[in-house]
Amino acid sequence: MSAPVTTGTTAAPASPTTRTPDVAAERARTPGCATGHHFNAAGAALLADATVDAVIDHLRAESLSGGYEAAKHAAPALDAVYARTARLLGVGPDEVALVESATAGWQRAVSALRLRPGDRVLAARSSYVSCALHLLAAERDLGVRVELLPNAPDGAVDLAALEAALRASPTALVTAAQVPTSSGLVEPAAEIGALARAHGVPFLLDATQSLGQLPVDMGAIGCDLLIGTGRKFLRAPRGTGLLAVRRPLLERLAPEAPDVRGALWTAERSWELVPDAKRFELWEAAHALRLGLGAALAALDSLGVDMVAGHLARLAAGLRERLAELPGVHITDPPAAGGAIVTFVLDGLDASDVQRELAERRVHLIAVPAGHGRWDMDPRGLTKVVRASVHVYNDQSDLDALVEAVREIVRAHGTDVRAAGRRTVSEAPTPKADVRDGPRAVTEMPTPHVATSPAPRVTPHVSASPAPRATPRPTSRCHDAIVVGLGVHGSAALHRLAARGLDVLGLEQYASVHELGSSHGATRMIRRAYPHPDWDGLVDTAYRAWAELEEASKIQLLDITGGLYAAPLDRPDPLRGPGCRQVDPEEAARIFPGLRLPAGFGAVHDPGAGIIDARETLRAQLALAERSGARVLDRTPVLDWQPDGDEVVVRTADNRELRTRRLVLCTGPWTATQVPSLAQHLTVTRIVNAYFAADPEGPLGRSGLGSFSVDLPQGLLYGFPAADGRGLKAGLDSGPAWDPDAPRPPASADELALLAEAVAQVLPGAGPVTESLTCLYTMTADRRFIVGEVPGVPQVLVASACSGHGFKFGPAIGEALADLVCGTARPDLEFLSPARLLTGRDR
């Protein structure tokens, strides 16, 4: 961004109605609501069940009877799509053509105008890139004159300038986007149409971003041609679009390339166009997608466009106001904004980076570059904006999630909300925040959260004299299980419990996928090599569980690279494991040419070792859990829990009391505060990792390196090859004790120097540090996990599968916790029992 942007004011809702749709019902018929917080209706809205069913049912009919036969059977339903489209636009069905996309409709309509050299086109700055490119090509190739209409101070088309331009000389076409792709602007379409009609000039309205969110009546607007798409606010499948041409203009337009759908071949060298708008269609069409469009139009018709328009305008206005109050956030919508779209930028951050960080928090929207709306964005000094767009399936919890996620991102990049004096959105107490000042520092593990005041430390369930509490909101419902903490082990447990049909609730004190615990970041290691046979069974179970998770999620989560794990030859507990073998330094050098072992070192080769996609793992497990019926409450800290007979009462920071038959604690670095009886056996440690410059095609890339560790005097060095475009990743498996609620500054020069020294010792091809990150390990003295019943409280389970090597067991630990909740004994986990710490059996 190179110029100031406006904060903007909100235009009145498109419709005066104050009726609201049944948002809960819309969410119930929209499966995608379970996968995150979706704000991309202006790109591709979430499909409803009925729409998906319409598409699949027709495809199934085609598979059983053939495409021609299925189309014949579906003819009445296909005809109904024209009728529904016509009703939406206020035209006749014969004035509607169904096309593959809005761009396809635009190109056929403009080409049919047969623009000639010298013809004048007046285009609004709101025009979309594909439309603008077509006009510019016509200007270059045909000699058409394209004139851009100036904007008024409110950001919309200057109507006085339009009228003056129309009076100045003959004009062939006026065109505008009712709502652009690059902001929440709503153009005065009816006023533009009235001026064009007064001068006898065709008006082409791009309604791509307005259909489904605003009333669009072609007669009232005064447009002669209209294009739109199904995939945006109409909530139809991709690959659907429409072109409407009103009479009498329709009779004067002929497509440049007639198709058998729109023309009759009457003699050897003659043909006739069909009398209606189908002259712009192609015979080959995706009938299944068109039936999906029909289902989406029927759903919109049942709700009423006016009600939808008013509801979306109110949602977006509230979102715009709340985002504008955050420090470092600038609304980029012009004063004439309204409707369902909100655009903004964050100080010092590229919009695509903001989009990526929001996606990591399960908040989904899009970044719009200037190249998609250059006539609009260039004059306003914008290179890219973040675009959020609401729909009928969004509720206040979605808005809260987006606002809070933006607040976290602002805070993570150094803006202090408290110092700025802004109000916060969430009323729940949150932990102390820190300010990171390293320009390239990246925190891949816990990162402090924005707050107006520090969060109270979690009070454990045992209390001789309970502190007075506010009267809670009781609930009579008793869940089968509540899982607290939704990192890799908590989300795995939630998934496996929900898959068994249990009534399960997940509680997370921050956003569902956040950077404040011990599970986030890009990559983790998986290996079979372990020093003791106790681990072999769990290792095998883990690999099977990963394969099942990949199959269920349809996502590749493991990248098997092989691994080398090196240590001095006199190490008392060398690594070993199923499928692993000892290799000498010479063979190690042949396996991984990029790794140079010191004298006196040997290594274990693990061909089954590799890299885990940590970020996608969290997303997959949460999505599968919610798809199986689990409910997730994020930003819901647990203040304390207490056993109550055979059940457990859980009290949250938003003053709820929840009941459950089994409580599962997967709280990572906060385990000691949840289970104080284990506190003296747990140490939270700060760990530094870094990326080092390395050629991905060289010896430190996949061809010369896999996952590795080397036990050096500086500590256990571990890492991955330069395989993800960020360089070689390495870290040392040791560090100082750390309070998980304390501010966490970026890696210091001394910490990075120690890590760089270790890297240089065994990876001589590594370049300088390019990024650094910190994370937290929760360590036991024997570096084994804690998985099992809380001693003395059998209805509460705890899983602290950490100690620096627990992520690889995530799906297996989740399955184990589900077994224990359901009363299935797991004697194979006895060596990880929490009771061993209290009886001195840890080793």
Image (cartoon, helix red, strand yellow):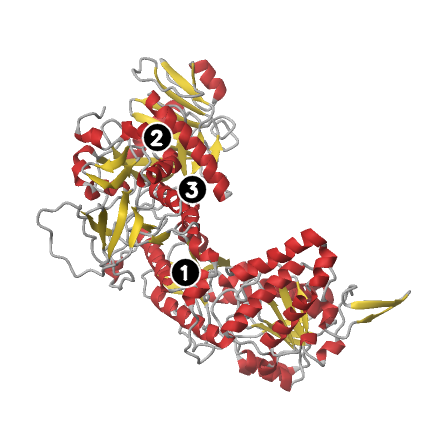
Task: Tell me the SS state at disc 2.
Answer: helix
Residue 748 visible, this orientation:
no
Q: Quadrant of the C terminus?
A: top left
Q: Nearer the viewer, residue 729 or 610?
A: 610
- Nearer to us: label 2 or label 3: 3
Which residue is identified by label 1? 345
Which residue is identified by label 3? 617
- The residue located at (23%, 46%) in the rendering is 743
Residue 666: percent from left, percent from top: 29, 42
Which residue is identified by label 2? 756
Taking the view exactly as shown, the residue that stands out farthest to the bottom is 198
Looking at marks 2 and 1 on the same chain, the residue that comes earlier in the sequence is marked by: 1
Q: Which quadrant of the view contains residue 160?
A: bottom right
- Label 2 amino acid? Ala
Residue 15: percent from left, percent from top: 46, 79
- Nearer to us: label 1 or label 3: 3
- The residue located at (18%, 38%) in the rendering is 792
Task: Tell me the SS state at disc 3.
Answer: helix
Looking at marks 2 and 3 on the same chain, the residue that comes earlier in the sequence is marked by: 3
Image position of 61 (left or right of 307): right
